């Protein structure tokens, strides 16, 4: 690349517009992807909104676990709405651009939702630990103030780290091409455009990973070590089954989320392709937000009971109206 071409690429980047290549290589198949992603986005949105409404409308679900679940659903809505609507538009148009401000906002919300979800999953694991290992003191330990504090801390960590990371990245000078090979503003792609030394960026990213992704994961692991130890000591098989059933939905969600994280961070860089990276990103942005409400609905008797009660009340109110 000549100096003039390099300078042109830099000027286009600094002009405030990026090109998201995304699924452009699929050509006419983008129409099919549009239909698939639209359907899954609507399912994710409706599923998570349903969880929020069920918890709000049913006093039987006004417990710490479902309080955290509502916040988890909100973070999932942030994930999907941050990325998918723009992807749907880009699948239908030729010019797949995003402004510098839009890119910064997208990265900010992506980091915010991701770190908040990690902390919320840790809070839910701690809630299950207290419920199973210290049942007699559950209401005292998991008081309203404690739950509000854990929820507030989760969102505060997500907001503060995301703002700091995004402000730092977009305050530095950018060099090189303005094309991002993914379907949304991927953090690593933007960081590669920065003119500063990559090792300083890598150190900051590693610190965030260790503190706010692996840290909550350690809390989850330690909680479940104690939970499993306590469950195995229960005298009856039925008691062990019931105790484990209260954790199964959360454990499934944790496995899905952190399994995707491990796949994303530990995959061999040399064998990594843009296509494989985008498939992993789709797990974060749309697959997991679709699956989480299904997991908590199908595997949870309380949520299924609340759903039946809510539907029954709606039908009854309509019959009275007519």
Image (cartoon, helix red, strand yellow):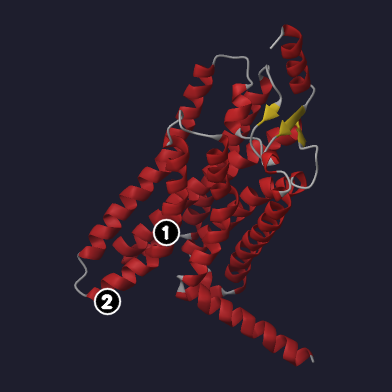
The residue lying at 22 percent from left, 69 percent from top is 234
In space, the residues marked 1 and 2 are separated at their CA atoms by 21 Å
Residue under label 2 = 238
Q: Is residue 74 visible?
A: yes
Assign the C terminus to one quadrant of the image.
Answer: bottom right
When asked about the image quadrant of residue 180, the answer is: top right
Query: Where's residue 178, x and y in %?
Result: 71, 25
Q: Is residue 174 above or below residue 53?
A: above
Assign the N terminus to one quadrant of the image.
Answer: top right
- Observer-nearest of 84 and 307: 84
The residue lying at 30 percent from left, 72 percent from top is 241
* Label 1 SS: helix
Query: In the rendered structure, which disc, 1 or 2, sits on the residue that comes first in sequence?
Result: 2
Query: Where's residue 23, x and y in %?
Result: 67, 42
- Observer-nearest of 148 and 197: 197
* Label 2 SS: helix
Residue under label 1 = 252
């Amino acid at each position: 690349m000549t100096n003039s071409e390099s300078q042109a690429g830099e000027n286009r980047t600094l002009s405030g517009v990026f090109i998201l290549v995304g699924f452009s290589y699929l050509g006419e198949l983008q129409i099919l992807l549009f239909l698939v992603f639209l359907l899954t986005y609507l399912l994710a949105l409706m599923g998570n909104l349903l969880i929020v409404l069920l918890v709000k409308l049913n006093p039987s679900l006004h417990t710490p676990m479902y309080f955290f679940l509502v916040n988890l659903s909100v973070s999932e809505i942030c994930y999907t709405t941050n990325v998918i609507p723009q992807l749907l538009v880009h699948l239908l148009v030729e010019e797949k651009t995003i402004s510098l401000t839009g890119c910064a906002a997208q990265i900010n919300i992506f980091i915010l939702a991701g770190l908040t979800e990690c902390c919320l999953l840790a809070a839910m694991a701690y809630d299950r630990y207290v419920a199973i290992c210290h049942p007699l003191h559950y209401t005292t330990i998991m008081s309203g103030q404690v739950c509000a504090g854990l929820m507030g801390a989760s969102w505060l960590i997500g907001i503060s780290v995301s703002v700091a990371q995004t402000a730092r990245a977009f305050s530095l000078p950018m060099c090189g091409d303005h094309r991002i090979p993914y379907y949304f503003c991927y953090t690593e792609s933007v960081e590669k455009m920065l003119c500063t030394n990559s090792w300083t960026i890598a150190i900051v990213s590693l610190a965030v990973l260790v503190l706010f992704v692996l840290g909550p994961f350690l809390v989850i692991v330690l909680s479940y070590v104690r939970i499993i130890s306590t469950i195995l000591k229960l005298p009856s098989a039925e008691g062990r089954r019931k105790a484990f059933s209260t954790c199964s939905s959360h454990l499934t969600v944790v496995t899905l989320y952190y399994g995707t994280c491990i796949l994303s961070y530990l995959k061999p860089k040399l064998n990594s392709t843009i296509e494989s990276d985008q498939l992993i990103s789709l797990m974060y942005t749309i697959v997991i937000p679709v699956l989480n409400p299904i997991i908590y609905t199908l595997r949870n008797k309380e949520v299924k009971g609340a759903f039946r009660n809510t539907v029954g009340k709606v039908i009854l109110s309509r019959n009275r109206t007519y």
